[in-house]
Image (cartoon, grey):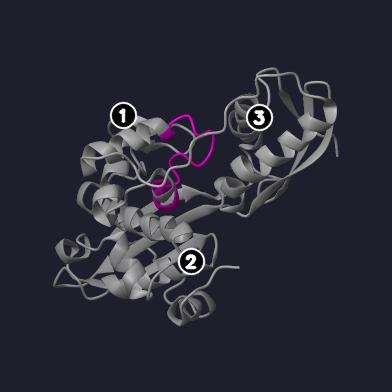
């Protein structure tokens, strides 16, 4: 269970400014309900071009609700120029801190605010635009975004980047690219990174394969799924066919087939056997 500050719990249990403003001056929406985190932020300006009203709708965990609630309180009374200086760390600080594994909720708030201001200034309603080279294709995170969270939050490790913007938290193919970005920014190599276990070099018995599959699911797959309220259960193994069932928020996710192919199967191919084929167990 996460250890939240009293202020996080207060904003989670008593969220301020919930809802949507009719005919807002600015509106920004980030995330995806299918992936477990989504936030819509709307604001209205007064005659002096200050934010008079701000409301939010969010779908996510306690820290996502608290971060959204805090953000609406923080921006009220500010000009857009003042509001757009708010960083994700400012949101976390306002709440007395967030668990590092939940810092992506503060980043989501900052991104929604930037989109809402962009919407006000340009009328553009197209949502988040991926500018620059996409590093993490699983979560659609660009080099520019990773660079920003590393610099704004003084990050030094790939796991930290995953906690802040989810990049590298699924198939993991981009982790080396993330490490290179960190090294470039900090002028040194990433710290505290654990070496990846070598791919098995010998034939596995059925019992060894099942055990290694369980270990890989526990270490390499479940942490990413649980961040979005999901989970996975190993149902059966028949030769190289691995039957699993997605649980929680992942059970009815619209992108479940991509999760099974690009996350679960990719991890098992890497850590267990390149011949693994993951199949969803029949209900």
Residue 63 got which mark? 2
Mark earlier in primary sequence (2, 1) = 2
Q: Nearer the viewer, residue 281 or 184?
A: 184
Mark pair 2, 1: CA separation: 29 Å
Pair 2/3: label in front: 3
Q: Find residue 244 and report its horizontal and vertical position in percent.
A: 77, 36
Query: Which residue, given by chain and number where applicable, does mark 1 sit on?
Result: 133
Mark pair 3, 1: CA separation: 27 Å
SS category of the residue bearing label 1: loop
What residue lies at 60% left-to-right and 26% top-to-bottom?
270
Quadrant for the N terminus in the image: bottom right
Q: Find residue 229 and report its horizontal and vertical position in percent.
A: 62, 55
What residue lies at 32% left-to-right and 48% top-to-bottom?
156
What residue lies at 73% left-to-right and 40% top-to-bottom?
214
Query: Which residue, given by chain and number where applicable, does mark 3 sit on?
Result: 268
| Residue 75 found in image quarter | bottom left
Quadrant for the C terminus in the image: top right
What residue lies at 16% left-to-right and 66% top-to-bottom?
82
Mark pair 2, 3: CA separation: 31 Å
Magenta-colored stretch includes residue 77 = no
Q: Find residue 273 and report its horizontal and vertical position in percent.
A: 68, 22
Q: Nearer the viewer, residue 260 or 27?
A: 260
- Identify the main secondary structure in magenta: loop
Q: Find residue 266 and report its horizontal and vertical position in percent.
A: 60, 27
Q: Is residue 135 above or below residue 41?
A: above
Neighbour tally class for label 3: few under 14, some 14-19, many 20 plus, Cα within 10 Å: many
Q: On the picture, is 52 further left or further right than 67?
A: left
Q: In this picture, which residue range is highlighted in magenta?
A: 161-175
Neighbour tally class for label 1: few under 14, some 14-19, many 20 plus, Cα within 10 Å: few
């Amino acid at each position: 269970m996460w250890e939240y500050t009293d202020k996080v719990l207060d904003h989670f249990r008593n969220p301020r400014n919930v809802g949507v403003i009719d005919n807002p001056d600015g509106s920004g929406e980030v995330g995806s309900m299918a992936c477990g985190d989504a936030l819509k932020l709307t604001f209205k300006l007064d005659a002096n071009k200050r934010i008079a009203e701000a409301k939010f709708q969010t779908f996510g965990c306690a820290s996502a609700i608290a971060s959204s609630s805090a953000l609406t309180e923080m921006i009220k009374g500010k000009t857009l120029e003042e509001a757009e200086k708010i960083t994700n760390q400012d949101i976390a600080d306002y709440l007395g801190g967030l668990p590092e594994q939940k810092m992506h909720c503060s980043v989501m708030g900052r991104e929604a605010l930037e989109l809402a201001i962009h919407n006000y200034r340009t009328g553009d309603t197209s949502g988040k635009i991926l500018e620059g080279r996409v590093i993490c294709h699983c979560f659609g995170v660009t080099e520019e975004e990773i660079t920003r969270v590393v610099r704004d939050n003084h990050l030094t490790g790939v796991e930290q980047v995953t906690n802040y913007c989810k990049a590298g938290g699924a198939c993991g193919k981009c982790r080396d690219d993330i490490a290179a970005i960190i090294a470039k920014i900090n002028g040194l190599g990433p710290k505290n990174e654990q070496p990846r276990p070598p791919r098995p070099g010998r034939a596995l018995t059925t019992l060894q394969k099942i055990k290694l599959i369980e270990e890989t699911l526990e270490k390499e797959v479940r942490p990413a799924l649980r961040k979005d309220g999901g989970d996975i259960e190993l149902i059966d193994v028949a030769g190289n066919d691995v039957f699993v069932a997605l649980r929680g928020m992942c059970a009815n996710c619209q992108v479940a087939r991509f999760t099974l192919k690009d996350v679960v199967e990719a991890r098992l191919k890497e850590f267990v056997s390149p011949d693994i084929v993951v199949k969803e167990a029949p209900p």
